[in-house]
Image (cartoon, rainbow, N blue to C red):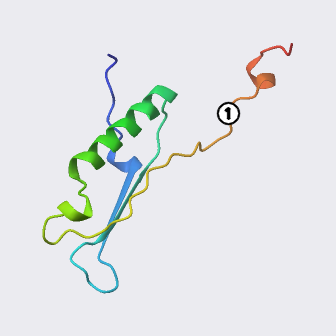
């Protein structure tokens, strides 16, 4: 397995702000940028899903103080994929 480089703190942004009603569960956000392969992204999604399964609860099993939360994970390329013309590939 190839070694992984941690994303420098300057490339990761995290927000921790209480909601307008000062609820005990603050709204949080995090974003990062970096270079990832398709395999890296698959692994990140797998680990994210594992964390949701580890820490999430069903309504009937939720501990006291747990609140329904909406979590999203998505990734978007910051630049278009290389076109065949710019990569030097010839067309069929």
Residue 89, horizontal then vertical, whole percent: 78, 15
Q: Is residue 75 left or right of residue 3?
A: right
Determine the residue positioned at 31% across, 21% down. Answer: 3
Residue 30 vs 1, above or below: the answer is: below
Question: Which quadrant is home to the N terminus?
Answer: top left
Question: Which quadrant is home to the C terminus?
Answer: top right
Residue 14 vs 88, above or below: the answer is: below
Q: Is residue 54 left or right of residue 17?
A: left
- Quarter where residue 29 is shown: bottom left
Residue 4 vs 53, above or below: the answer is: above
Q: Is residue 80 left or right of residue 3?
A: right
Determine the residue positioned at 33% across, 27% down. Answer: 4
- Quarter where residue 70 is shown: bottom left
**Residue ID for mark 1:** 81
Residue 40, horizontal then vertical, whole percent: 43, 30
Residue 5, horizontal then vertical, whole percent: 33, 30
């Amino acid at each position: 397995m190839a070694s992984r480089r941690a994303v420098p703190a300057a490339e990761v942004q995290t927000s921790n702000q209480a909601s307008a009603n000062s609820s005990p569960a603050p709204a949080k956000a995090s974003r990062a940028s970096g270079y990832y392969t398709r395999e890296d992204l698959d692994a990140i999604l797998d680990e994210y899903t594992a964390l949701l399964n580890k820490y999430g609860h069903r309504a009937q099993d939720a501990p006291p103080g747990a609140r329904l939360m909406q979590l999203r994970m998505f990734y978007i390329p910051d630049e278009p994929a290389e076109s065949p013309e710019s990569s030097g590939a010839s067309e069929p």
